Image (cartoon, rainbow, N blue to C red):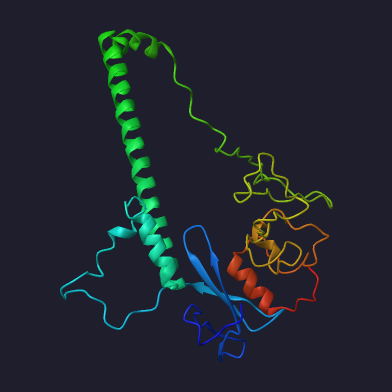
Amino acid sequence: MKFNLGNPAHYPFVYTDEDTCPRAAKYIRYLSLKDGVVHQGTSGKNKPVYAAPLHARAFPTPNFRRPGVKDTDLYIFHPSSASRIIVDDALYHLGDPGVIADVHTLRTQYDEVMRIKRQRLDLDNKEREANKRLLDMERYLANAAVRTCIQPHLLRTRPASPPTSFIPCIFAGQGPSDDQEETGNKRKHPPYPYCLKCHDDYPDHVKEDCPLWVVCRWCYSPLHAHDKCPVPHFNCTGMSCMVPETHPNYGLMCLRDDSYELRCAEWDADSCDQPRE
């Protein structure tokens, strides 16, 4: 309906538009819901519709303490009141939609409270019945000495072993012996350590790195790949060189019987372009 300021049954509806400016709705309506009444307003056809709960206007001087009828006495609005028909007729003649909305919401909440109380009473009865049956079953089992009778049968069953699936299999490789000498161009790779990151039962990281943990097989550094190792002769011994000929740094800085620090010093002192004699 079109809002009429002179009609006491019309409640003004003020909303904030997209420009955050307060505006008064030209059209209003009252929509009754399950547990309340909604006040809606819009500025015209095909315009956004705004909504807010509808409540009664505040009276200037409600009677809280003065003699006479107290406005805090609201029992006549209870759904089970004997004067409900008379009260409804008086509300109709009052013609205030906000008052009617609040009375409607008040009655629905009275009914909701009573429904919850009935559910709670029903649940209490069910709980007492379940506790009674529980006590009866405990008495039957206790007097039958069931716990004593089944004790030998409980000890007869052997407990299951703890699961061992979480224990990874360890694969160790045999390295070159100390007295093994280099023969021709045949060179053996150093043993690859077991991959502690992927926990694979059968690790195979000879040709490719582990996708979860990349460690250089020559100097055990996680900062570079095998083919880019600057010190691939870390595992070389005094008897044999462990670096394959296909490595980019093959033949560089391998002093064999010297320590790793001496190898680095020699590599820094000499040119990296000089092949090993």
In the rendered view, would you say 173 is above or below 84?
Answer: above
Within the image, what quadrant is residue 210 found in? bottom right
- Residue at (73, 61) in percent of width and height: 226
Seen from the viewer's position, the closer of residues 34 and 256 is: 34
In the rendered view, would you say 14 is above or below 115?
Answer: below
In the rendered view, would you say 31 is above or below 194?
Answer: below
- Residue at (40, 61) in percent of width and height: 88
Seen from the viewer's position, the closer of residues 62 and 127 is: 62
Q: Position of residue 63 (x, y in %)?
A: 23, 75
Seen from the viewer's position, the closer of residues 51 and 154 is: 51
Q: Is residue 72 left or right of residue 250?
A: left
Within the image, what quadrant is residue 59 found in? bottom left
Seen from the viewer's position, the closer of residues 168 and 99 is: 99
Q: Position of residue 72 (x, y in %)?
A: 25, 67
Q: Is residue 244 left or right of residue 191?
A: right
Within the image, what quadrant is residue 223 found in? bottom right
